[in-house]
Amino acid sequence: MVIDAIKMTQMPAPSGKFRLLIFVGGLSAIIGLFFFPEIFEAIAILLGAYTWRNERGMGGLYLIIVGIAFMILGIYYTSYYSFANFIY
């Protein structure tokens, strides 16, 4: 009985379309740490929400959490070290 409950709670692996969205969202989250976090992290969060809603898996939820955390870190980082400081 417990094994049946565990099998029912396991999420299936994401399909190809959603794997691509998770990859693009993760790449956007990493880029957003250093350049324009308000834009790139919003893209990551939106892709995560879309994936989470349509896939019913945990990949989208993880992307939302990473997007929010990286947005906070990215805004903090870029407020002190902007890209212009690296050029000059």
Image (cartoon, grey):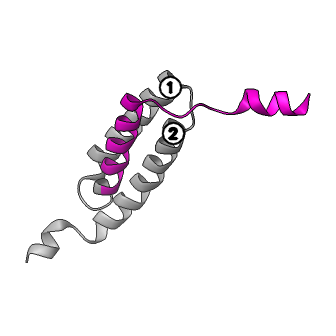
Q: What residue type is labelled 2?
A: Gly
Question: Is the residue under label 1 in contact with that under label 2 (CB below 8 Å)?
Answer: yes
Identify the main secondary structure in magenta.
helix
Magenta stretch, residue numbers: 1-30
As displayed, is residue 66 above or below residue 18? below
Which x, y percent locates residue 23? 36, 44
Image quadrant occupied by the N terminus: top right
Q: What residue type is labelled 1?
A: Glu
Side of 36 where 74 appears, left or right: right
Q: How crowded is mark 1: few (under 14 residues within 10 Å), some or many (20 or more)?
A: some
Side of 61 where 35 appears, left or right: left
Residue 46 quadrant: top left
| Residue 55: numbered disc | 1
Residue 73 quadrant: bottom left
Front residue of 84 and 14: 14
Q: Residue at x 26, y 71 (%)?
A: 81
Q: Please check the rendered image and state whether residue 14 is part of the magenta-colored stretch, yes or no.
A: yes
Q: Which residue is drawn at 56% across and 26% down?
A: 56
Q: Name the residue under label 2.
A: 59
